[in-house]
Amino acid sequence: MLDLPFIWAALIAFAVLAYVVLDGFDLGVGILFPFVSGEAHRDEMMNSVAPVWDGNETWLVLGGGGLLAVFPLAYAIILPALYVPLTVMLLGLIFRGVAFEFRWKTRRGQFLWDWSFAFGSIVAAFAQGVALGALVQGIPVVGRAYAGGWWDWLTPFSLVTGVALVIGYALLGATWLILKTENHVQRRAYDIAFWAAPATLILIGAVSAWTPTLNASYLERWLVWPQILLVGPVPLAVIGLAYVLLRGLTQRRELSPFLATLGLFVLCFIGLGISFYPHIVPNSVTIWEAAAPDNSLSFLLVGATILIPLILAYTAYSYWVFRGKVNAVGGYH
């Protein structure tokens, strides 16, 4: 018999990961806007993500909507706990979306929309990191309801994770621009990546060292024998990818820095999964406790098995069509 709650947990985790790695680089491009001057250069940056940025957010809708439909108890607990950062995140995404469209419609006020695009990107990324940090540090639950206060999400740990995600997205955006652009924008992206990469690695180390101190169960999963044998390959893989990233930047390679940065995000996400499992609300509610009835899960799974492959196929086709380099005037070539 299929373990439907586990299958759905895996699907939602995949949707969230897909959002982070796909929308992360276009948020990163927005974060880098203040660091690249010149209208033509900023046009080139926007052209690099214009064909795909809107579709990338499909995964955010799938993850959030899937959580509501499949794990309603978890949704009912997490949303009140993270209401402020999630609302700020959505407002930031709306702000940057409007700015993305409007900056092409005006010349006199274009600088305002440029800064709006950067501001919305930074706010959305920071709010995502804060929400993640608040979730990792734990949500107090009594019975089947959130039992914390209005500002419980605001802690030193959540602020650090917010900053870490902003810098991580900046690195992802820089390596994307290295891959997709040429000349001035590419050189500027290399310059930014040279400081963003060490900063990201330092923050990954800091958050990873801090996390086990937040909860005894995290400490047990990561640092207690024999579990350490199972999770040990994750930090070792992080070290390996860090080497590939820094070597690729030093040798001015185009593809390996982007792939290495994506790999770092994937490994950090795997680390979160190791820390959380089998809980969906850390240390309070398990996947099976939060799941909807099996009949509902089965019905929704039919739709998911049709729609998710279609989304993947369309996404892959879009990236294939818009492969290659981009410029400010002619777009992709």
Image (cartoon, helix red, strand yellow):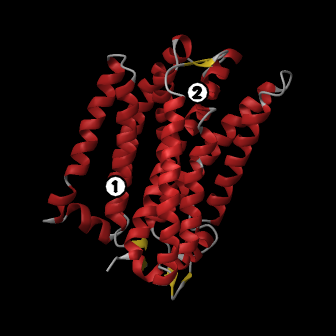
Residue 123 in view (yes/no): yes
Q: Horizontally, is 324 left or right of 99 in the view?
A: left
Mark 1 vs mark 2: give the one in front: 2
Q: Looking at the image, which is closer to me, 134 or 260?
A: 260
Q: Horizontally, is 266 left or right of 23 in the view?
A: left
Q: Mark 2 packing: few (<14 Cα in 10 Å), some, or many (20+)? A: many
Q: Residue at x 19, y 53 (%)?
A: 232
- Point out the tag, 1 or 2, that comes first from the N-terminus: 2
Q: Horizontally, is 223 left or right of 144 in the view?
A: left
What amino acid type is highlighted by mark number 2?
Ser
What amino acid type is highlighted by mark number 1?
Ile
Q: Position of residue 106 (x, y in %)?
A: 84, 25
Circle 1 residue? 270
User: Is label 1 in contact with label 2 (beta carbons under 8 Å)?
Assistant: no
Q: Mark 1 packing: few (<14 Cα in 10 Å), some, or many (20+)? A: some
Classify 18 as above or below 318.
below
Q: CA distance from mark 1 to mark 2?
A: 28 Å
Q: Looking at the image, which is closer to me, 242 or 305?
A: 305
Classify 164 as above or below 185.
below
Q: Looking at the image, which is closer to me, 313 or 202?
A: 313
Q: Position of residue 270 (x, y in %)?
A: 34, 55
Circle 2 residue? 48
Classify 165 as above or below 170.
below
Q: Quadrant of residue 213?
A: bottom left
Q: Residue furthest bottom?
A: 143
Residue 165 in view (yes/no): no
Q: Position of residue 332 (x, y in %)?
A: 58, 21
- Element type at mark 2: helix
Q: Quadrant of the C terminus?
A: top right
Q: Residue at x 67, y 47 (%)?
A: 93
Q: Position of residue 223 (x, y in %)?
A: 21, 61
Q: Quadrant of residue 262?
A: top left
